[in-house]
Amino acid sequence: MNKELKRVSTAVLLMFVALFASGTIITVFQEENLRADPRNARTLYASFSAERGPLLVDGVPIAESTPVDDDFEFQRVYNDPLLYAPVTGYFTLNQGNAGVEGALNDYLTGTANDQFFDQLNAIFTGQSPKGAAVELTIDPVAQQAAWDALGDYRGAVIAMDPQTGAILAMVSKPSYDPNLLATHDTSSVITAYEQLEADPTSPLDNRTIGGTLYHPGSVFKVLMTAAAIDSGEFEPTTEIPNPPTLQLPLSNTVISNAQGSTCGGGATVTLANALRLSCNIPFAQVGASLGEDTIAEYAEAFGFGSRIQVPMSATASIYPDGMDEAQLMLSSFGQYDVRVTPLQIVMLSAAVANGGELMQPTLVERILAPDLTELVSFDPTVYSQPISAETAETMVPMMVANVDSGAASNARMNGVDVGGKTGTAQNAEGTPNTLWFTGFAPASDPQIAIAVVVENGAGFGNQVAAPIAKKVFEAVLNK
Amino acid sequence: MTSELTSAPETASIRVRLRQPARLRNLELVLVVIACAVGGGALVLTQLGALGQTDPGVLMLAGVLAVLVLAMHVSLRLTAPQADPFILPVVTLLNGLGIAAIYRIDLADGDSGWDAAGVRQIAWSSIAILAAIVVIVVIRNHRVLQRYRFVSMFAGIVLLILPMLPIIGHEVYGAQIWIRVGTFTFQPGELAKIALAIFFAAYLVESRDSLSMVGTKFLGIRFPRARDLGPILVIWAAAMAVLIFQRDLGTSLLYFGLFLIMIYVATGRVSWVLMGLGLFIGGAVIAGQVLGYVAGRFRGWLDPFNPEVYDAVGGSWQLVQGLFGMANGGLLGTGLGQGRPDLVPLAQSDFIIASLTEELGLAGLFAILALYLLFISRGFRIGFSGQDDFGRLLGVGLSFVVALQVFIVVGGVTRIIPLTGLTAPFLAAGGSSLVANWMIAAILLRLSDTIRNQPRLVV
């Protein structure tokens, strides 16, 4: 009997060893994952009972926590909610967070690693914990001007400082009121969320960095021109054949220029004029000549295919691969399967405006601890150098000509040189064209780069999108 | 050496014999006082942590318990002076920690008076300690129990069937394992495990020779004759059937394990274990296919974080809440009264281990498991050093049933095995479990006393 007893004792011991091990795994090795699980109500209670840090624009809070008398102690309040919704996002009890609220949640709740000593300090001094304040790069003047200029259109405006990458304006319409999602009554939050979700105009989408991606149409020619010149295959004066129509190789599709005729007359047209007059056929030929690989390389350097963090993740813009020649030619003036965010388009202009150096776009100026010490300051960082300084220098006058005496004339300003490019992308039959403008001003020392997109306007980008950009330029430069 | 041997060997041995019992009981007294102090300290800390002040009412009630534990200690001095000195302190400490953890949830939920599970637990603890004293005082020689083997068998079966009777049967969370008279509920299955352990031990002592020697060989395994096996298979099948109809997976596993281990220890035949495991795995697979709630438990065990499983009815929501709680505790815990164990469902009963781990941390969990191990090892000592096979088998059976119950509960909460509805012995809220486990402790105390006393045969 003793032999069996020994075996049973061993078995019991092993059972307990397993319990010791599983207890250790849960409390030590899985601890972080379990704490970070969004379904963990403890993390939620902790993040609500701490005073969440504010989001500041020029020192004025656009989102702040005010004390209330319920379980959660603080209520998140959004000031000017519709205007800033794409930037702030929302902070809900248990339905997830979006925007800067979501991307910088750790700092705002005070649980980021940089704040470890503050947490310790709060424990020893018995103070209630506080989150850090986030100062945004948004320029309230630019933001308001963009909001007003966009009017009742569905669409988006994003503006950035090409020299630093600071995002000056981020407007998306239609917008929504994040206060509705921040109440502590879960069922009314869910109702509000479901209504916004069901809305066919998708107010929850931040159209500047996500949502349904757009066809770029002719604004893609900025990238094509940059690639053409930077690769050394073309110069602004290079002559390109100029037929009124062109049948795509191995295809029945016939393309034409927006004007319905040749590009400015003559048997050939220069690259500069093709850009200025925004002609499709010359760019189709430029694309065929450069080849998919070269264009893809430039697209990637400009940010295509990357989920850029601003700090929330933008949807990656798409330059398709594996195209046949007809598809390559269509994509070369921004049709076929090229899909972009307005952020990607403003990055094209910003790189050209900043001597070929593309700055990392960001919304965050700096993060301040409750005692106003600086936890993080965002020094301008270079995202990439997609084109050389010479290429950029060559392109600036080409884009200025486009506004001065070309297809983007409605962005023209008195006394200030503006560089720009419009676009009118065709979508499926029966849906309106996507109207674009992207550009920068002043051309001599660019302070602002912009991308404007309008989903439901009539006519061309120059008629609808360019005047919107002009109003934002005026607001910023006349300050 | 030789001079010392001739000097006073006899007086030395006499002195040891005379002083040993008192020494054992004095050790027990010291440990019991420490256990009561720790339990009381846990209550005070809980109050300070959750309320910021002390509340003497509950502490007075707990004081009554301390007096009862001392009464048990005195009855041991009188009737079982040579009993094991560790069992009573360990059990007292576990019971005390359990009360603190249960009371902590009452504080969070704002329950007081008889609505408070903590107060009810204190009341039940007194009843359980009284029951243990009665066992110690009445059963002076454990071999008496061997005479009542068939009474035990029938008592076990009746206790198991009781909850299925129409008027007094009572269903909670889908498991029909309670009886209710008025507002008074009881889980008779807990007592049945003692009755069945007594029956198994008595029966196996008698028939183990024929069980292990005689039989026909088939596929290299010796199968016993039907008439040797009959009674045990019958009672096992009855227990399993009742438990499957009562939908209580954990208890079913518990009885099966008890049955298997006792038969293995009695006969020394590995084939029994293999056969039994085969039967159980087969049964579990079939149950998983047929019974929805068993399948749900398996899915919840394997993939608890999958949103579909998490949100499903009978899914892994409960289990994951427990995991969140334990993770919140980390290495050292949040401190008593300072976590949020009230966010975990059934935090006073099935998930009390998660509650305690949240507030006492991994360190606290290890301490609790170590206390259980100590209790179980004292029980196994009876198996190793006892003189009569009935006592040895009973001691092993009863301590193994506690070991297995701890494994099923803690293993279920920490995801070693699928979650089943069992209570942590001595810790969790539940009167029937407390009474049964204190009685087990009393029987083990009696067994350990008789080992040293070498009782005469009474059969």
Image: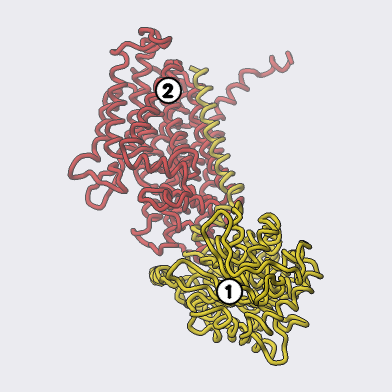
Chain colours: A yellow, B red
Q: Chain of mark 1?
A: A
| Three-letter code, disc 1 | Ser
Q: Nearer the viewer, residue A449 or B78?
A: A449
Q: Residue at x 64, y 18 (%)?
A: B9
Q: Chain of mark 2?
A: B
SS of the residue under disc 2: helix
SS of the residue under disc 1: loop
Q: Tell me if residue A193 comes above or below residue B348 in the rendering.
A: below
Disc 2/disc 1 C-alpha distance (Å): 103 Å
Residue A264: percent from left, percent from top: 65, 77
Is residue A238 visible to us here? yes
Q: Residues within 10 Å of mark 2 (few under 14, many from 20)?
A: many
Q: Residue at x 69, y 64 (%)?
A: A302
Q: Residues within 10 Å of mark 1 (few under 14, many from 20)?
A: some
Residue that label 1 marks: A261
Marking on residue B393: 2
Picture quadrant where residue B300 is located: top left
Q: Nearer the viewer, mark 2 or mark 1?
A: 1
